[in-house]
Image (spheres, grey):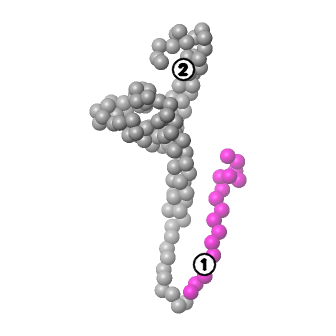
Amino acid sequence: MSNNEDKINITFFLHENQESNFDYEFNVDDILKEIENSELHEIKIPQIINYHENFTVKELIIICDYYGFAKEIKNNKYNKEEIIHFLVEFENNPMNNLIVSKRQNLWFYINELKNDKFMKKYVLWS
């Protein structure tokens, strides 16, 4: 994103009506959080679809195992939808950016090795 895309412009006009006793309070921080959440929601939907259509439960549990919470997933007997939502929430938490980036990078390398005619015989995980 460029610097211009990062900025949010909000314009509003207030006209005081002496006849009305209507008080309306708003918090700009709440509005910005709502905007941020809607943007995150737009990011989460493709992730959910990707996990649902392209990953088995076994593969999702391997991802959870990489992140260190597969045991919790298994103990609570989460179904595929619950696992996906748990993963998407975890991966969209800014505090987890490093481990998520590393996992995605390593999964990319695994796929590259699996798609190579020579190297695929050395990849044990399918």
- Quadrant of res 61: top left
Q: Residue at x 66, y 62 (%)?
A: 9
Q: Residue at x 55, y 48 (%)?
A: 42
Answer whether residue 33 is magenta in the image.
Answer: no
Answer whether residue 13 is magenta in the image.
Answer: yes
Q: Position of residue 67 (x, y in %)?
A: 43, 31
Label 1: which residue?
14
**Amino acid at dot 2:** Ile
Q: Position of residue 71 (x, y in %)?
A: 33, 30
Residue 15 vs 6, above or below: the answer is below
* Magenta stretch bounds: 1-17
- Does residue 77 appear to the left or right of 106 in the view shown? left
- Does residue 24 appear to the left or right of 4 in the view shown? left
Q: Is residue 24 or residue 98 the one in the foreground?
A: 24
Tell me if mark 1 has few (under 14), some (14-19) or many (20+) residues whose alpha carbon lies within 10 angstroms of its own: few
Q: Residue at x 48, y 80 (%)?
A: 23
Tell me if mark 2 has few (under 14), some (14-19) or many (20+) residues whose alpha carbon lies within 10 angstroms of its own: some
Residue 99 vs 123, above or below: the answer is below
**Amino acid at dot 1:** Leu
Q: Earlier in the sequence, mark 1 or mark 2?
A: 1
The reply to whether residue 72 is in sight is no
Q: Is residue 111 or residue 3 the one in the foreground?
A: 111
Label 2: which residue?
110
